[in-house]
Image (cartoon, helix red, strand yellow):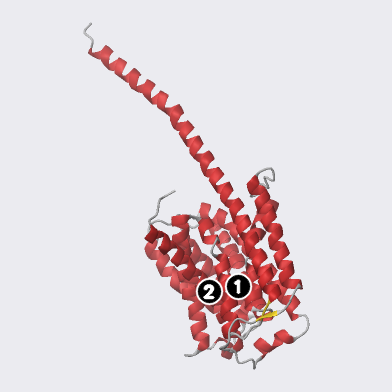
Amino acid sequence: MENYTGFQRVKHVGAMTLAAVLLGGNIILSKVAADDGMTMRVMVAYRWIFATAFLGPIALVVEWNKRPKLTWTVILQAFLSGLLGGSLFSILFYTSVILTSATFATAIYNLIPAMTFVIAILLRFENLSFDKASGKAKVMGTMICIGGAMVLTLYKGLEVHMWPIKIDLLHHSNEATSHKKLPGTFALGIVLAITSCICYSLWIVLLAKVSKNYPCHYSSTALMSLMGSIQSVIFALCFDRESAQWKLGWDRRLFVVVYLGTLGSGIVVILMTWCSQKRGPLFVSVFNPLILLFVALASSLLLDETLYLGSVLGGFLIIMGLYVVLWGKGKDMKASRFILSKEASQKNDLEAPQDQEGQVTGSSATIKQGTPQ
């Protein structure tokens, strides 16, 4: 592993902190767009349209003459990526934000690493290895995450007041934000949040196949965004055909969709890719709880959301379980690197005597050729 200077480490931490804040901004602004009368279907469609327009030129420039041939397998995987990690996930997740609360949906979002571990085991992409400390840690972390989700869902508790003054950005005057008062909408929001996490976990498992068949991150992300935009536009047009729903002016709607597509998607992808290349995917995952912290603070200040003790305790348990899962995953990664380095050194040790034997044979032949008869 490379040794980084203090300033380089600060840059890596700063980049991931900024990415977490930008992702938290996606969640906060989705409620602002809904309050302005914009449906989540149209918002998601515009998000992926702007993301494709932003990431497409970057992929063309950065990975020029580096991309492998585009096959039907890659196109199918990009379609599934655009569905699971793009259009379907976004529609389900942002709708759950409207039906529940920004803090609640973000806390459920932190279940993704544990869900990914469970799905990877069910699909036989990963071994349980319960006899090892790493396997026990991942199982224990998953159980803690599930317990945290149950506390978050079933226990409300006392109100937690954090700000002496609140700035409410919502109008609370249209159907998009008032319909969550109807009975059963909170339960539906929970189902949608969990389903969105399952979709995202399936996408993470699929990413291993995508990276192997098409190892150009920016191009594959741009292709995924293109597929997601096509899917989300078709889906939105099935329900929202009025031109007023799609109209963008110099208002909050335009700001939200441009932010979601460029800063909340494009810049975040660049920052996370850079940090993943420098410090590894585990380093990137460690910053997920920062999104929950930012959303909890911002939603209580800007959206007039009430924070309850149950949300705090449930969120804390989910974050604790997340770090236990990541610790186990980190142990597995270290063990894999050790095995690979050991195999490489053994291969070099086996090849060295053969090279020396070849050199000796060549020298003997040269001596024989140079000896007079």
Where residue 230 sits, quadrant-wise, is bottom right
Q: Is the residue under label 1 in contact with that under label 2 (CB below 8 Å)?
A: yes
Q: Quadrant of the C terminus?
A: top left
Q: Residues within 10 Å of mark 1 (few under 14, many from 20)?
A: many
Q: Taking 36 as reference, is 286 above or below it?
A: above
Which residue occupies 60% across, 61% down? 203
Where residue 361 sits, quadrant-wise, is top left
Apparent side of residue 218 relative to residue 195 in the rendered image (left or right): left
Looking at the rendered structure, the secondary structure element under dot 2 is helix
Looking at the rendered structure, the secondary structure element under dot 1 is helix
Apparent side of residue 9 relative to residue 32 in the rendered image (left or right): left
**Mark in front: 2 vs 1:** 1
In the current view of this chain or complex, which residue is farthest to the right? 183
Which residue occupies 41% across, 24% down? 353
Foreground residue, 165 or 69? 165
Q: Position of residue 122 (x, y in %)?
A: 70, 52
Can the viewer see residue 202 in this picture?
A: no
Foreground residue, 86 or 103? 103
Q: Taking 263 as reference, is 112 above or below it?
A: above
Separation of residues labelled 2 and 1 (CA atoms): 10 Å
Q: Earlier in the sequence, mark 2 or mark 1?
A: 2
Residue type at the position of mark 2: Trp
Residue type at the position of mark 1: Ser
Which residue occupies 65% across, 73% down? 105
Can the viewer see residue 337 in this picture?
A: yes
In the current view of this chain or complex, which residue is farthest to the bottom? 173
Residue 90 is tagged as 1
Q: Which residue is mark 2?
A: 48
